[in-house]
Image (cartoon, rainbow, N blue to C red):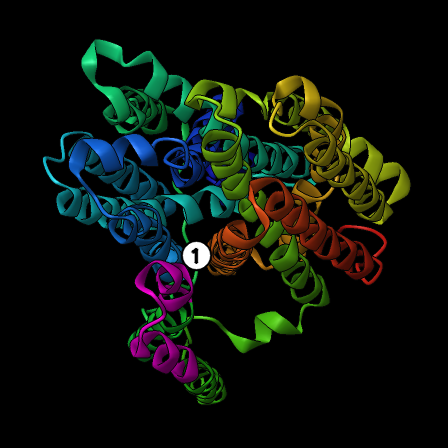
C-alpha cells in the first residue's frame, strides 16, 4: 500500500458514547423531582380539596392512592419501554403528559374528575421517572456517575419534604383565587421549561439489544401490586369491607404466579419484565431490602406529621409545611457530602445515618410529648435537622448501591425495579403508619397517638441500620 493510498484511507471509529452534561443532568433531575413532589404535595391540601369539592374521606384517599397506585404499578413497564424505544423519547413524552394531566387536575370540576386526572398523572410519572436513572447509568461513568447518583438521591429526598412545604405555601397563598388548584397548576410552566431543556440537553440512549414487552409479566405484576396496595390504602377509609381481605389473600398467589412466569421466560431464553437474574446481584438485592423500611418510615412520618400539626395542633398549611423546613435544608447539604464520605468510609456511612435518624426521630417524639399542642418549627427543629442529616446519609447511597452492578443494557429495568420498590413502600408507609396513627387517635388522643407512631417508626429505623451492616463495604 502506498503512502498516498494510506493517507486517503478512512478508518471508521466507533460512535462516541452518549454523554450527559451538566444542563442535561439538571433537566433529568427536574423530571425526577416532579413525580415525587406531587406524591406529597397534596397532603396539606386535602382538607381544602375536601371542603371545596364536597369530597368524602374515602374519595380524598383516592386522590392520593390513585396517583400512587398507577405510578407504582407501571414503573417497571416504563423502564422497559425506555430501553426499547429510547429513554429521551419516553422522558419527553412522559413529561408532556405529566404537564397535561397536571392541568387536568388543576381544572377538575368534581372530586371524581380529580381522581381520574390523578390516576392519569401517575401513568405519566411512570413513563418519565425510570428514564432518569437509566439515562444517568447509560450516559455517565466513574466519578461523574457517582456524583450524578448522589445528586439524584438528594433530589429524591428533598422533593419528598419540599412537596409538603410547597403544598402548604401554595394553598395558603391562594394565587389568583386558585386555592388548592395551584398545587397542580404550578407544574405546567415547570414542565414547559423542562421540555425545552430536555430537547436540547438530554442525549438519546437505549438498550443495544432491545427487549420486547413481556405482556403476561406486566399483567401479573400490575395485579400483584394492586392486590397488595389497593386494600391497604383504601381499607381503613372504606371500613375494611370483604373485598379488601380477599384482595390481600390473593396477593401471595399473584406474586407467586408472577415469579413463576418470569422464571420460566428466563429459562426459555425469552425476556421477562423483571429478569430473575437481576436478583443474583447481591448489591441490588440487599439495597432493595433496605429501601422498604426506610421508605415506609419516611412517607408514614410525612403523612402523620401533616395530620397531627393541622388537625391536632391547629397549625395552618404553611406552618405545618414549614415545620419540616429544617429537615429539607439539612438533608440537601448533608447529601452533597455523601459521595466524599462513602469514598473514605464506605457504606458504613449508611449505618451512621440510621443512627442519626434514630436520634432525630426520638427528639421529635420527645418534643411532641413535652410541648403539645404548642408544636411547630421551633420545637421540632433539633429533631428534624438531625433526622434530615441521617436520612441524607442513607437514601442517596442506597440508590447507588442498588444500581452499582446493573448492566447498562438493563439500566431501564433496574431503575424501574428500584423505583417500584420505593414507590410501593411509600404507599405502604401511608397505609400502615397512617392507619396506625388514625386508629389510635380516638382512644389515646392526638399527642399520644403521634408519640406512639414515632416510636414505631424508630423500630423501622433500627431495622434499616441493622440491614445496612449487610451491604457491600465499597460501591463499584
Q: Nearer the viewer, residue 138 or 109?
A: 109
Residue 358: % across, % down: 78, 44
- The relative height of residue 170 versus residue 117 in the rendered view (above or below) is above
Q: Report the side of 16 relative to 240 (left or right).
A: right
SS for dot 1: loop
Q: Is residue 208 visible?
A: yes
Quarter of the image for residue 251 reads bottom left
Q: Report the side of 372 relative to 439 (left or right).
A: right
Residue at far right of view: 345
Quarter of the image for residue 144 reads top right
Q: Main secondary structure of the magenta part?
A: helix
- The relative height of residue 238 versus residue 131 in the rendered view (above or below) is below
Would you call the spot at circle 1 few (<14 residues within 10 Å), some (14-19), or many (20 or more)?
A: many
Q: Is residue 248 magenta?
A: yes
Task: Name the residue: 67% across, 32% down.
Answer: 147
The residue that mark 1 highlights is 207
Residue 120: % across, % down: 22, 48
Task: Name the residue: 40% across, 31% down.
Answer: 44
- The relative height of residue 444 versus residue 183 in the rendered view (above or below) is below
Q: Is residue 372 magenta?
A: no
Residue 285: % across, % down: 66, 67
Question: Which quarter shows the N terminus?
Answer: top right
Residue 32: % across, % down: 45, 37
Amino acid at each position: 500500500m502506498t503512502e498516498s493510498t494510506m493517507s486517503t484511507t478512512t478508518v471508521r471509529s466507533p460512535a462516541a458514547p452518549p454523554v450527559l452534561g451538566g444542563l442535561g443532568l439538571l433537566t433529568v433531575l427536574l423530571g425526577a423531582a416532579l413525580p415525587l413532589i406531587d406524591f406529597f404535595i397534596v397532603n396539606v391540601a386535602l382538607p381544602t380539596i375536601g371542603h371545596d369539592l364536597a369530597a368524602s374521606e374515602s374519595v380524598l384517599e383516592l386522590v392520593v392512592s390513585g396517583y400512587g397506585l398507577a405510578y407504582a404499578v407501571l414503573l417497571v413497564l416504563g423502564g422497559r419501554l425506555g430501553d426499547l424505544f429510547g429513554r429521551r423519547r419516553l422522558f419527553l413524552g412522559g413529561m408532556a403528559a405529566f404537564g397535561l394531566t397536571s392541568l387536568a387536575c388543576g381544572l377538575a370540576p368534581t372530586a371524581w374528575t380529580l381522581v381520574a386526572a390523578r390516576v392519569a398523572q401517575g401513568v405519566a410519572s411512570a413513563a418519565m421517572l425510570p428514564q432518569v436513572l437509566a439515562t444517568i447509568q447509560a450516559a455517565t461513568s466513574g466519578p461523574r456517575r457517582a456524583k450524578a447518583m448522589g445528586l439524584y438521591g438528594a433530589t429524591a429526598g428533598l422533593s419528598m419534604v419540599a412537596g409538603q412545604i410547597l403544598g402548604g405555601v401554595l394553598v395558603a397563598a391562594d394565587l389568583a383565587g386558585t386555592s388548592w388548584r395551584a398545587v397542580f397548576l404550578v407544574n405546567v410552566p415547570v414542565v414547559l421549561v423542562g421540555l425545552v431543556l430536555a430537547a436540547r440537553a438530554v442525549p438519546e440512549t437505549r438498550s443495544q439489544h432491545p427487549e420486547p414487552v413481556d405482556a403476561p409479566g406486566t399483567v401479573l405484576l400490575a395485579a400483584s401490586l394492586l392486590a397488595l396496595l389497593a386494600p391497604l390504602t383504601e381499607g381503613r377509609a372504606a371500613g375494611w369491607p370483604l373485598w379488601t381481605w380477599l384482595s390481600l389473600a390473593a396477593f401471595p398467589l399473584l406474586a407467586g404466579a408472577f415469579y413463576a412466569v418470569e422464571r420460566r421466560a428466563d429459562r426459555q431464553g425469552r425476556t421477562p419484565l423483571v429478569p430473575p437474574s437481576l436478583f443474583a446481584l447481591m448489591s441490588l438485592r440487599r439495597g432493595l431490602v433496605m429501601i422498604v423500611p426506610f421508605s415506609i418510615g419516611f412517607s408514614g412520618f410525612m403523612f402523620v406529621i401533616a395530620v397531627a400539626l393541622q388537625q391536632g395542633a391547629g397549625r395552618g398549611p404553611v406552618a405545618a409545611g414549614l415545620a419540616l423546613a429544617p429537615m429539607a435544608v439539612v438533608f440537601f447539604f448533608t447529601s452533597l457530602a455523601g459521595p466524599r464520605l462513602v469514598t473514605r468510609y464506605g457504606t458504613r456511612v449508611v449505618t451512621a445515618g440510621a443512627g442519626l435518624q434514630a436520634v432525630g426521630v426520638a427528639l421529635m417524639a420527645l418534643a411532641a410529648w413535652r410541648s403539645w399542642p404548642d408544636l411547630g418549627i421551633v420545637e421540632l427543629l433539633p429533631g428534624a435537622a438531625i433526622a434530615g442529616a441521617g436520612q441524607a446519609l442513607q437514601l442517596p447511597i442506597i440508590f447507588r448501591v442498588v444500581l452499582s452492578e446493573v448492566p447498562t443494557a438493563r439500566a431501564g429495568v433496574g431503575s424501574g425495579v428500584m423505583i417500584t420498590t420505593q414507590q410501593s413502600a411509600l404507599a405502604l408507609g401511608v397505609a400502615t403508619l397512617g392507619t396506625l396513627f388514625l386508629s389510635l387517635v380516638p382512644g389515646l388522643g392526638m399527642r399520644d397517638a403521634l408519640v406512639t407512631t414515632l416510636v414505631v417508626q424508630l423500630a423501622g429505623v433500627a431495622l434499616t441500620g441493622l440491614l445496612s451492616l449487610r451491604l457491600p463495604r465499597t460501591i463499584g
